[in-house]
Image (spheres, helix red, strand yellow):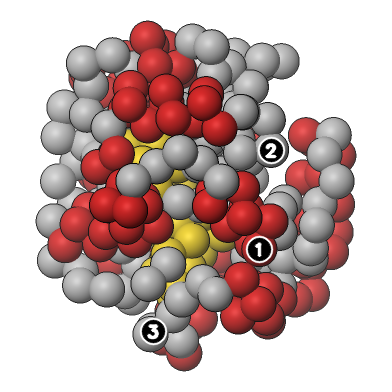
Amino acid sequence: MIIDSHVHIFPDKIAEKAVAGIGKFYDLPMRHDGKLDTVFAEGRKAGIDKFVILSVATAPEQVASINNFLAENVRKHGDKLIGFCAMHPDFQGIDAELERAREMGLVGIKLHPDFQRFDIDDEKAFEIYRAAEGKMPILFHTGDYRTGWSKPEKMAKVMDLFPNLDVIASHFGGWSEWERTPEAYKGRNVYVDTSSSLYKLTPEEVRNMVDAFGADHVLFGTDFPMWNMSDELELFAKLPLTAEERELILHENMENLLRKYGKNI
Ligand SMILES: [Zn+2]
């Protein structure tokens, strides 16, 4: 069983344009369009069984329609898809929308402070954190050496303020800021994912990250459509990890995390 815990999807109509925008933002080539059919095709090639799908709302007006879109796909492909809903700090009625998302079968939240242009530790986002605490984990984009929105230290501060919030700090806790991430989160119960990191970190560096965060707190993710699922799994296979650690990272950690919230996958 392999779960890709970080998969961006877009409605077919806007997929190509949205994906081009992300590639430009990170100055990285995007390997794929962001269509669900492509997720399934690439997943089949790579041998990935399940996908955590998400989509970022860059404006509050997009939140409800994105959540409808994600929920509709989870309904259609419940055996393969796990949905993390969109939210935005400027959204009016955060509690009610998160409740609606849960009723529609979405089990987590995805936030991207850099795309959504809010400081991860800005009080205006606290309503989301408060509403999520004990109810849904939040998968955050974290880290960008060029900006200040999602600094690992700010994420750690949020964790101290919301101790019952399950935080997945993507990209090993801070994309492009890896030299600081283990220290920034020290002593906190943070989950991290492997996405958009394996292209840059050496196998030894990843090994050290797994030791720092704990093998039971690392999730395999690809950040599709940025990367090829097969390439990411190949990079993962080359890491110096034990068979038990691989099982944890490839699926058990996500299963255990969601079980806490009553979701068996
Ligand atoms: Zn992401």
Q: Left or right: 73 with respect to 163?
A: right
Q: Is residue 73 above or below residue 189?
A: below
Q: Which residue is mark 2?
A: 199
254 or 89: which is nearer to us? 254
| Amino acid carrying mark 2 in the image | Tyr
- Mark 1 and mark 3 lie on one chain; the one further toward the N terminus is 3
Whether residues under marks 1 and 3 lie with C-beta atoms below 8 angstroms apart, the answer is no
Q: Which residue is mark 3?
A: 78
Question: In terms of secondary structure, where does tag 1 sit?
Answer: helix
Question: In terms of secondary structure, where does tag 3 sit?
Answer: loop
| Amino acid carrying mark 3 in the image | Gly
Residues packed near mark 1 inside 10 Å, few (<14), some (14 to 19) or many (20 plus): some
Q: Give the quarter of the figure containing the C terminus.
A: bottom left
Q: Quadrant of residue 45?
A: bottom right
Q: Which mark is residue 201?
A: none
Q: CA distance from mark 1 to mark 3?
A: 23 Å
Q: CA distance from mark 1 to mark 2?
A: 13 Å
87 or 211: which is nearer to us? 211
Picture residue at 35% right of the left edge, 67% below the top: 106
Q: Quadrant of residue 162?
A: top left
Picture residue at 61% right of the left edge, 28% below the top: 202
Counting the numbered discs, the total is 3
Picture residue at 54% right of the left edge, 19% below the top: 178
Q: Residue furthest bottom?
A: 76
Q: Which residue is mark 1?
A: 230
- Mark 3 and mark 2 lie on one chain; the one further toward the N terminus is 3
Q: Is residue 16 visible?
A: yes
Beta carbon at label 1 within 8 Å of ligand 1: no
